[in-house]
Image: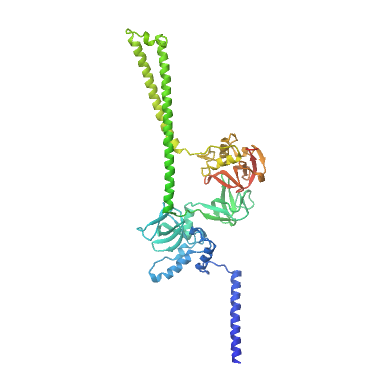
Amino acid sequence: MYKPTKRAWIVGLSAGLIIAGAGANINAQAGQSYDSSNVGISNRVGEYIKSGKESDPVAKLTNGLASVSDSVVSKKKASEDEGIDLIDASLTDAKEYPQFKGRAVVTTEDNVNIRTKDNTDSEVVGTLARGGICLVKEIGKEWTKVASGSCEGYIANEFLAYGDDAGKWCDENGVGRTATVCTATLKVREDKDEKSDCLTLIPEGEAYYVYSVSGEWTEVSIDDDIRGFVRSEFVDVKYDNPRAISVEEQEEMDRIAQEEADKAWLKYLEEQEALEAEQSAQAEEDNQDQTEVAEADTDTETGIPEGEVESQQTADEPGVEGEAETETETETETAEETQEAETETETEEAAPEASEETEVAAPAGSTGVDLVNFALQFVGNPYVWGGTSLTNGADCSGFVQSVYAEFGYSLPRTADVQAGCGVEVSLSDLQPGDLLFYWDGYEIGHVAIYAGDGVVVHASNSRDGIKTSPFNYRTPCKACRIIGQ
């Protein structure tokens, strides 16, 4: 009886363990959330690496996938025997500002250096600007090991704010934020109330500038004419912190900037040389005209027919010729001095204009595609309310008016009046060069040029300037065709 009983007891115990394990697994899958408190970082980092590692470690590593603060704690414990002093990783906790969990931001007034070692004598591998963000890898008593962009190295602790403190610093120091829509279509309302007027609809995946976040509502800017509220649960708000720039990247940027500056200077010198040659030629022409006029006046005063001045002049009348010559020379010298003064003034005035001139490709062709290609070269130029300059600043309707003027079309000044031009076309039949108009909740408040492939080019707002956007980045209400109607 002993052997069968023992055997049965072992079988029963094994079965119980198997059932208990299975139950635990079922319960874990059904009701347990895995986070840094119950899953080792190595497992989550492994999953992260399998899914595709980013070149910038700040971008996704700590975005809910892994917390480097866990590794800091483990390293602290593991390094006690090695005599390495590491500060408690709770500094990087971020309950109020989850985006900054395991991260830090630079709080200096200027750029801070990233060094190869934790001392000021070590080599600089890159720089991180004020408000720049980095991934925290180790926190020592005086230095923090960080990673940002393509750089990895050390920054002195005194230049950094960590975790929630980093988020608070960003709020207090005006670091910009963007809200990315994470639902199919989102309503932008006039007030923080679902019963308030809907100003427009914005699509999934588009990002908009954030003015404020207050609980359930986030205030966003769409264009110069719309600023409204969206439900916070339907947008992903991120701070626009810069990443580090490596020494090599900075050198390349400096090289390109120097090349552009050299080209601009050479162009300016060529323009000045051409201007001076033109002014010199004009001065000679003016002097010649003035000399001919003076000679004609002299001939009239003496009453001697033209061509006989020399033959009629006698030794008894030396003063007539001398006086005429003196008067002519005086007038000529005065004209030359006046011309030289005007030339100097024109040169001084032309210098700053030439240095500020932006190289712009002239319009080519006469189709809607030609107009779009011309308009796209101004992307990145500033937005200026009431402006019409394609290079120095324009608002939405001023941009459209100036672009079309280059192709011989005279359009009204404002978007609502421009909406009455040309021929109205269906939103499903858009062609490059068509004008798209947008409602601001009460009237037409914005206009853009359709560029094709579902994209528009437009002067958006003072932050973004002239830019491209999906044609439905807000709700279009009308389309008109000016070219090819």
Q: Residue at x 37, y 16 (%)?
A: 327
Q: Is residue 297 above or below residue 474?
A: above
The answer to whether residue 162 is left or right of residue 34 is: left
Look at the image and tell me whether residue 125 can be seen: yes
Residue 342 image offset from top left, x and y in percent = 41, 27
Q: Position of residue 28 (x, y in %)?
A: 58, 71
What percent of the width, then of the height, locates residue 180? Answer: 57, 54
Question: Is 277 left or right of 450, judged from the image as shown?
Answer: left
Q: Residue at x 48, y 66 (%)?
A: 70
**Is 295 drawn above or below residue 171 in the view shown?**
above
Q: Could you tell me how many numbered marks the image carries?
A: 0
Please state the horizontal and vertical placement of residue 387, each as a whole percent of the image.
53, 38
Task: Name the residue located 64 percent from the left edge and 52 percent from the top edge.
Answer: 195
- Regarding residue 96, the answer to whether it shows in the image is no
Q: Quadrant of residue 141?
A: bottom left
Quadrant of the drawing holding the C terminus: top right
